[in-house]
Amino acid sequence: MQKSYQFKPIGIIHSCFKEKFGIPRQARLATEATATLELIPPYNNENSIRELENFSHIWLIFIFHQSLSTQWKAMVRPPRLGGNKRVGVFASRSPFRPNPIGMSLIKLRGITQQKGKLSLELQGADLLDQTPVIDIKPYIPYADSVENAQSAYAPTAPETLLPVVFSETAQQQCREKEKQLNTSLSLLITQILQQDPRPSYKTDDDERIYAMKLYDFDLRWRYQNQHVYVIELHF
Ligand code: SAM
């Protein structure tokens, strides 16, 4: 019998993404998606992150904590293959894996220390709010980036992006909300929706109004003529 191993979270993510639906399918696809990694005692110690501020990007190793109740399967259907072709779970980035561990390469915007909390400020995260992080490693280009590497069914970032159109109401609501947030909300919404977060088998226009939880509101939109129409931010 193989031994099993236990890991403790070293930090918790605070992110604008409050539910799984709508989160970009990889890190750095929505560059306006900011998040904070708050380090947990005893790791919230300046010594643990000394020199980290001099790295522009970091790897976060985390637990897919909202996929724990779903059994993993040997084969999965990656959205990049339209959801109709299966590949081995280890040839995928699926959250449903034997050990539900994810890894994301993320831009490190800075490190803050406030009211006894030590936090890493992140940009371009694909992480759900409250995600437990079990490790941080600096990104080292000479070792981590490979020129001319082959990447099977996902050779480049998704290229088909849907045009995103805002209603006047949504535009006004974005302008109001942006005053509180340190980010361009309309750009973030565009980055999320242009990648079409619907399941990959669903690419036709339909009558449905879609919604996802972002910050403290529900973002609502619909599809028409292969465009995304942002209806409103519902508070
Ligand atoms: N970059 C990571 C990787 O390659 O391991 C994650 C890729 S995975 C395909 C990205 C999806 O994971 C997101 O679209 C989101 O729906 C989901 N996700 C993000 N954080 C999660 C969490 N804490 N628990 C479960 N699912 C999560």
Image: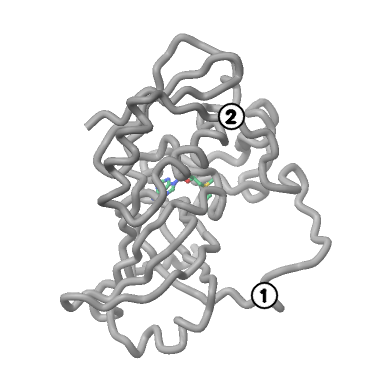
Q: Say left or right for 30 vs 62.
A: right
Q: Name the residue under label 2.
A: 163
The CA distance from mark 2 to mark 1 is 33 Å
- Picture quadrant of residue 114: bottom left
User: Which residue in the structure is indicated by mark 1?
Assistant: 141
- Residue at 50% across, 34% down: 193
x and y percent of residue 192 in the render?
A: 49, 39
Disc 2 marks a residue whose amino acid type is Pro
Q: Which mark is residue 8?
A: none
* Circle nearer the viewer, 2 or 1: 2
Mark 2 or mark 1: whose residue is earlier in sequence? 1
Residues at discs 2 and 1 in contact (Cβ within 8 Å): no
The answer to whether 10 is drawn above or below residue 189 in the figure is: below
Q: Is the shortest distance between ligand 1 and the CB of mark 1 under 8 Å?
A: no
Q: Which residue is drawn at 42% across and 52% down?
A: 127
Q: Residue furthest left?
A: 115
Position of 162 with respect to 172 (left or right) is right
Residue 70 picture quarter = top left
Q: Is residue 101 left or right of residue 140?
A: left
